[in-house]
Amino acid sequence: MFVTPEQITAANQANLEAIKSASSKAYTGLEKMVELNMAASKAVMNESFAHVQAVMEAKDPQQVLALQAGLLAPMAEKAAAYGRHVQTIVTEATADLTKTFEGKAAEGQKAFADAMENMTKNAPAGTETAVAAIKTAMSNSQSAIEAAQKAAKQVVSMAEANIAAVTEQALNAASTVSKKA
């Protein structure tokens, strides 16, 4: 079986659409991160000025200490909330991109397997050993790809679990600080 120019054009168009989709999803995640960072920066700036103003208006050192102590717990809670937002954005973007790439990888693997199957069916007599070696290599490469995908999913899961644990620790620390204050 020979590949026609129309098949090559169709494959290139499909690949272009996949790249366009992945780029769009990545850009959407970037936009969300920029929006989050802009909102967080603005909030920090406004809260900082308000805090400085309150400290400047304090009448005695005890008031200044109380203001400083009262600042710690909300900061920790806001940092934890920021971390949760970042985790959500990254998780969504990663899931979208992973789904896109896994779909394209599966299509590519199937197309390659079909091409190899056609090639081995039409192999000349006496090439059975070479055909068997090619089939073994294909099987091994499929196993390696599946193992890499599984490992990548495990890494993402572990990262998400670690971020969740750190966020929970920050919230607990913020709660402890606010109780002491």
Image (cartoon, rainbow, N blue to C red):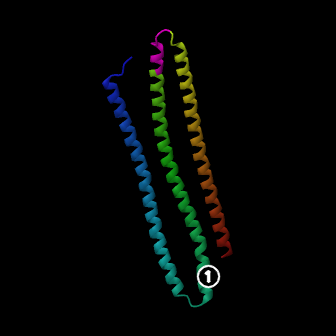
Which quadrant does the C terminus fall into? bottom right
**Residue that numbered label 1 is attached to:** 66
Residue at image location 58% in from the left, 30% down from the top? 143
Residue 68 in the figure: left or right of residue 42:
right
Residue 13 in the figure: left or right of residue 69:
left
Q: Quadrant of residue 59?
A: bottom right
Across and down, in percent, residue 2 comes to: 36, 19
The stretch drawn in magenta includes residue 121 = yes
Vertical placement of 177 versus 23: above or below? below
Q: Quadrant of residue 179?
A: bottom right
Residue at image location 59% in from the left, 46% down from the top? 155
Residue 46 in the figure: left or right of residue 166:
left
The stretch drawn in magenta includes residue 119 = yes
Vertical placement of 126 versus 102: above or below? above
Vertical placement of 117 versus 181: above or below? above
Across and down, in percent, residue 79 comes to: 56, 65
Across and down, in percent, residue 41 comes to: 46, 68
The magenta stretch is 116-125
Which quadrant does the N terminus fall into? top left
- Three-letter code, disc 1: Ala
